[in-house]
Amino acid sequence: MATNTNRTEKRGERARSKSGFTCSECGGTEVVQDLEKGERICAACGLVISDHRIDTGPEWRAFTADEKDARSRTGAPTNYAIHDKGLSTMIDWRDHDSQGKRFTAKKRSEIYRLRKWQIRTRVHSSVDRNLAQAMSELDRLASQLGLTRSIKELAALLYRKLIIRRLARSRSIDAMVGAAIYAACRLRTAPRSLEEISRHSRVSKKKIGQ
């Protein structure tokens, strides 16, 4: 099976890799994978070890995490920037069916009840309510600062870790979101200053940097 690195390489390129296989001809262990022909070749003597191998990777190339997410056609990935990671069911707020026809009064009443219970099941604990509020603020700040999706998701992941480890008890949600964004930007080598973050946040620079 081709590795994740090999999947993003151009078709026709060859990639060397170590494997547990030993060449029966020369005893070599370094294998060259020809992705275009589907062959594995001994790098030492050129013996074709196997052929007609299936590349299960995508046919497209991606150089960044954002490009990979945008080109994927296997369904929505888990999103840490949504309080429930995007795994719950979404009920559209519009009272229309798939053909654009408006629901009857009875159907609208039924859909209203479903929406109400759907919201209750998505946000049913104090942690869920905290995350829902935090992710909403994170989305707003990320938009104001022009952050990439990968930075936004990293900030969301850092915030979740703070909640899990109970390190955010004495600080406001807005301050912790600002701190998570500041840390995520530094980790992704796209730093934003505390002044810039506090300018778009509801809290001061001092509270974010505590």
Image (cartoon, rainbow, N blue to C red):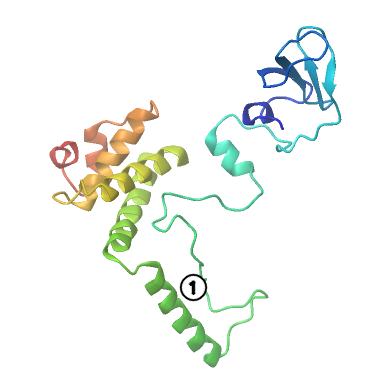
The residue under label 1 is which amino acid type?
A: Trp
Tell me: residue 133, above or below residue 199: below
Callout count: 1
Q: Is residue 188 left or right of residue 195?
A: right
Q: Is residue 119 left or right of residue 133?
A: right
Of 86 and 101, the residue lying toward us: 86
Of 205 and 130, the residue lying toward us: 130
> Residue 128 is drawn in which quadrant?
bottom left
Tell me: residue 158, above or below residue 102: above
Pinpoint residue 145: horizontal percent, then vertical percent. Answer: 35, 40
Of 164 and 193, the residue lying toward us: 164
Pinpoint residue 158: horizontal percent, then vertical percent. Answer: 33, 42
> Residue 39 is drawn in which quadrant?
top right
At label 1, counting other C-alpha atoms closer than 10 Å, the crowd grade (few under 14, some 14-19, many 20 or more) is: few
Pinpoint residue 33: horizontal percent, then vertical percent. Answer: 75, 21
Pinpoint residue 184: horizontal percent, then vertical percent. Answer: 35, 35
Please tell me whether mark 1 sits on a helix, a strand or a loop: loop
Q: Which of the image's four quarters has the C terminus? A: top left
Q: Which residue is mark 1?
A: 93
Q: Residue at x 26, y 31 (%)?
A: 193
Tell me: residue 66, above or below residue 91: above
Q: Residue at x 18, y 47 (%)?
A: 203
Q: Which of the image's four quarters has the N terminus? A: top right
Q: Residue at x 18, y 51 (%)?
A: 172
